[in-house]
Every structure is written in structure tokens, then in C-alpha cells.
Image (tube, rainbow, N blue to C red):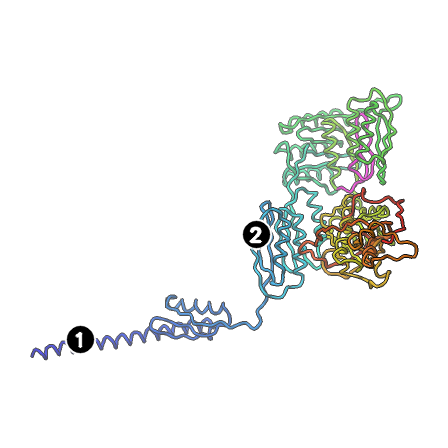
Amino acid sequence: MRLSTLALIAGTFAAAGGASLLAANFSATLVETASQSGVLNELDAEGLTWAEVDTNGLQVFLIGTAPDEAARFQALSAAGRVVDASRVIDQMLVEEPEDMAAPRFSVEILRNDAGISVIGLIPAATDRTALVESFQAIAGQDEVSDLLETADFPVPDGWEDALRYATSALRDLPRSKVSVAADRVDIKAMTESAEARTRLETTLTRRKPAALRLALELTAPRPVITPFTLRFLIDENGARFDACSADTEESRARILRAAARAGLEAKAICTLGLGVPSRRWADAVELGISKLKEIGGGSITFSNADVTLVAVEGTAQDAFDRVVGELESTLPDVFALHAVLPKPPEQAAEGPPDFTATLSPEGRVQLRGRLASEIARQTADSYAKARFGSGQVYTAARVVENLPADWSVRTLAGLEALSMLANGTVAVTPDRVTVTGQTGNVEANAQIAALLAGKLGEQATFDIDVTYIERLDPTLGLPSPQECEQLIVETVGSRKLSFEPGSATLDGSARDILNDLADLLKKCGDIPLEIGGHTDSQGRESMNQQLSQKRAQAVLDALRTRLVPVASYSVKGYGEEQPIAENDTDEGREANRRIEFKLIGPPAEAVVATQGADAGSAETAKEDATPEEAEDDTPKDGEKAQDEGQKQDDSKDQEVGTAEATSDAPAEDTTAEEPAVEAPPMQAPAATEAAAGIGADKAVPDAAVREPDFKPDTTGNDG
């Protein structure tokens, strides 16, 4: 009995365990089937038919080859919507693309007072080290943060040109953001002034490669205008501004609308600036212009808070009094009004005193009329010579007593106003200063008005009739860099530039050529120009390179002393590396001894204007000759030079130039080691060449240029 009871209990438990096992197995199979079916249905609904599903208990395995990463991620997301994402096991593969598309290469460059940071993706073929070094050269002691990444794909067309242009532009933009792509450069920068902004816009646009798109967004801080000046006139020529200043865009719009209601038809320039005397500046100006129209004409001048109203001669007294009274009662409190109703002047026997200064288009200045004393005449003469040049001023003014107390101030103010013109006249009388002429400065009227208002005081009366002439504007009509390159060749023409034998000192015949080139290059402005020196193959290669480098530098120095903007110029001595003729004939060697001007920019066909030579390449006589030969190298009649090496080296003493220069003694060794000046990184020469017969990219000072009448002794054998 006891055994049967135990067996019954054991059998019961065994049966229950077996039933539980069967139930669990059935439940697991049901869960797996449901999960697999649900996930497959969701994948099919998403169009992901390439994916297969397998299950193992609660785990769901995704199997298959996805066409791309996006499809793989989409399959994972679809499965996660059916079952818990933690149950999904990713066993999918991603198909390798047959031809992977190249990424978009771009660089963002930020420059400020803390340094330069550069971030972006560049081709692996781009010289990253040289690029960062070029940024470090620009930043100086400041930090350069290199956050660049590289990708091994072909370099897109235009990439190197765009990067080179952006690096060059960054030199002139201390606070800027430059975005570089293969076909486009975007520049956002802050400039120091409106004039600097205009100059940079012109320079950057002219320097841009032809195929590159450029987007410029240059801003300038508002200038401080002192005195804060506005002058509006209504006369027989109509309504116009001589000067206009405003503190905000809204104020400017209100002022221009008031002027239009008063009869202004031409487009007016109203400068936004700092220094406004009152927030109600626009209220005062609007009121003043409207009252000027009411009395029929004249002028109204605002100089800070001082307001001067000058009516037209012959204005009715009652109308004048009414307008003045209304202005005095309605002008904002800070403004003070001074009103003038001109009366016909009383004529003296010899007429009213006057002083006239004229400036011709050629720059000649004549001073005529009356001055208060001999000291006043000397002062006016000295001031004019300082402004216009001592050789350009002719003074024929006479000294007269009993002139107005402020006569000297008025005449000097008139001369300063005249200096703002290209040509014109200033006439000074006791009651008026009149300025007429032409200028290339679009803001000349406003600047002259501000000057006269500040110098002559609030009660002064002056007329300004200055015409803006576009051809006189120095920022317009400038030749392109390519045109400048061609003009260099035309300027030099058949002339040649020569050096002293064996040295980098230009002789006297170079002065006229350098002067002409300086006049041209000043008009060309800031262009990327390389001045390269070349020699023939005679002499040591290292000596030839050093001499060509020094002569190129000498030309650059000479141009700098003539006030040519050479900041974007570079020099390089090529020595004998780039011959343009065979070196086995005298003619070939002479052709190879040359100076070339070459634009740094996109590749272009070279335009070479070869030059004659004045001397051989590098002078090594003192190194190759014996001491006795160095002391006396003058050959006797019919005697040839003893040392062939010395003869070859001496033949280079006159490498570049146009006039032959010889010497009776071995030239001093001027080829001491001097590191070659390489073109800056990212500015590798790739443009047209213009050899203009000049020895170097940097010209020597005038003191180092020989006089034109210098005649070297020709008894030596080194020339």
C-alpha cells in the first residue's frame, strides 16, 4: 500500500511536468511564429523584401543584404515597431557600392585677433602641411587651429585655384570668415572704414580667377562724423545737398523725403555715422528744410547743434522774420539758430577784397588776390607747397592792410578744400567762400562742407559746386591684373635694365624705367605679382641662383621706394633652371639673362618679353682665381685669361639689364648666402609671364642706383 501511494504521487508529478513541458514548447513556438510573421509583414509593408527573419525564442534575427545603410536602418526600425527593439538581433550586411560618389570638398576659415581656425574636408592630394604653414605665416605669433579632414578622391576642377585665392584674400582680412568650395568662395569680413571696404571690394574682385564665383559681404563700422554736418541749398540750379549726415536708416529716409518735397530730384548721398548731437536730428533737419523752401531758397547748415539759415538776397523781411520765429520756437531744445538775411555789399573804390586759388588738371596751383601780411603770404605759400608739391605752386598774392580778422583762416581753409579736388578753384571774399571744380571722390561735397563748417564757424557762408567725374575716381577703371601684365611689357618696350657687374646694384640707366614702371604699378593696385630673376648656365649653379635672387629683390626694393604697393608681390631667383634659349652661344646666354614679371594665379599661356644682359651670372673670380690673379686680372695685349673657371663666372657679372657694364677689376663677391624667397604657399606661380628687362622683384633704393653719366673702365675681362 505504501509503495503504491508513493508511485501514484510520483506519477502525478511526472504527468504534470510533462504537460507543462508540452505547454511551454507550444507557447514558445507560438511566440516565435507570431514574432516572425509580424516582422515579415511589417518589412513587406515597407517594401524591404530583401530582408529575411529568423527566431529563436524571444530573439528575432534580421538576415539579408541591404542596398545601403539607410535601408538597413529602416529594416531595424520596422522590426522594432513589432517587437521590443532589445529582442532584434542585426545580422544584415550592406552591399558595397560599385562607384562611391566623391564628397563635397569645402573649407571654412575663421580669422580674428586670437588667430586662425580652419575646418573642413579636403582632397588627400592637397598639400595639407603647406596649407597650414601658409595660414601660420598669415597669423604670425597667433595660433592656427587645424581641424581639417582628408578624403582620397580626385581633386575637383577649380579647387586649387579657389583655395589659393582664399588664402591670398585672407592676408588682407584680419577679421573674416572665408568659405571655400571648388567653384565658389564666400567672404564675410569687417573692414576698418568705408574707404577700406571700397578698396578691398575692388582689389578682391580684380584678383578673382575668371571661373570662380565670388560672394562678398564686407561691412565697415560707421565713421565718427565731426562735426556732424548737413547742408541743404535751394538756388537757381535747384535743390541739392552739399553735405548730408544721419544717425540711422530711418533718419536718413526722413531727411531724403523732406529734401524731395523741397525740390530735390537728383540722387543724394547721406552718410550714416556716429556723433549725432541729438536723437531728434531728423526732426530738426526736416523742419529746417521745409522752412528753407517756404522763404524761397538759400541755404541751411547744421554743424552739430548749430543751425545757420542764410536766405536768398532780396527775400522779404516779413517772410524771413516769420520763418525765423517759427524755427526758433519749434527746433528741439539743443539746437541754436543763427539766421542771416544778406544785404547788397557796399562796394569800396577798388572793389571788395578777394583771394583766389586755382588747381589745374596738371596739378599746377596759382595763388592770387590779397593777404593780410607777409607772414600770411609765406604761410599760404608754404601750406600750398606742402599740399600740392613745392614745384607746383606759383604765388602772386599781394599784401593788403585792413582785411577781415579771419582772412587767414578763410584762405587756409579754402586751400585745404582745394586739395580735395582733382582740379578747380577756391574764391574767398569777406562774406563767402566758393569752391568749384571736379573730383573723383563721390563724397567730396560732404567732406568739403564739413571742413568749411568746422573751420569757419556756424555763421560762415560758403558755396560748393563740385562735380563728380567717374574717370577721376581712383577706384574705378583700373586695369585688370592681366592688362597690367601686358602694360608692363609695353612700358619697358625695347629698353633694358642693367646692373653693376657681379652685383645686384642697378646702374643709373635703370632710373627712368623704374619710374615708368612705378607709375603703372600704382594704378594696377594690389595684384599678385612675382618678379623672377634668371641667368645663363655659366658659373656655379648656386651662385647663379643667389645672384638672380638678389637682383629680383633689388627691383622690388626700388619699386617700394617709389611708393608702389608691393605687399602682394613676391620675388624668386631661378638661376639657370629655366632657360629660354641655348646656352652655347652668346645670343642664347644673353636671352637667358633676364627678369620676368609673372602673375600668380590660374595657369595661363606665358607671355615673355626677353631682355638683354648687362653682365654675366655669378661672380666667383675671387674664389676660383689665385691670389695673384685676384690682384691683377687685367690681361696683357693678346693674352687670354688663365683660369677658364674664372672666365665663365665673370661672364655672368652682367646678367640682367639692357646696357652693358664692364669693370677693370674682379667684382667683389656679392653672392653671400641669402635664402631664396619662395612664393608663399598656395600661391604657386601658374600664370602668364612678362619679362620686362628688370633684375628683380625688389628694387634698390635710389642711393644704390648709379648716375647715368657713369662710364666704367673697359680694360677688364669680367664683362
Does the magenta stretch mainly form a helix, a strand or a loop?
strand
Residue visible at 69% across and 55% down? Answer: 683
Q: Residue furthest front?
A: 628
Q: Amino acid at mark 1?
A: Phe
* Residue at mark 2 to residue at mark 1: CA–CA distance: 77 Å
Q: Residue furthest left?
A: 1
Residue visible at 68% across and 45% down? Answer: 197
56 within the magenta span? no
What numbered label is drawn on residue 325?
none
Q: Is residue 251 visible?
A: yes
Of residue 245 and residue 53, the one placed in the foreground of this image is 53
Residue visible at 58% across and 46% down? Answer: 114
Residue 207 in the image: above or below residue 41: above
Of residue 327 and residue 36, the one placed in the foreground of this image is 36
Asked if disc 2 and disc 1 are in contact, CB closer than 8 Å, the reply is: no
Left or right of 19 on screen, residue 38: right
Of residue 607 and residue 307, the one placed in the foreground of this image is 607
Tell me where residue 562 appears, x and y as whole percent. Answer: 79, 44
Q: Residue furthest right?
A: 637
Q: Secondary structure at mark 2?
A: strand
Q: Which residues are magenta?
A: 418-441
Tell me where residue 638 appears, x and y as whole percent. Answer: 92, 57
Q: Secondary structure at mark 1?
A: helix
Residue assigned mark 2: 145
Q: Is residue 477 visible?
A: no
The tag earlier along the polypeptide, 2 or 1, is 1
Left or right of 3 on screen, residue 710: right
Residue assigned mark 1: 13
How many other residues sit within 10 Å of disc 1, few (<14), some (14-19) or many (≥20)?
few
Residue 484 in the image: above or below residue 580: above
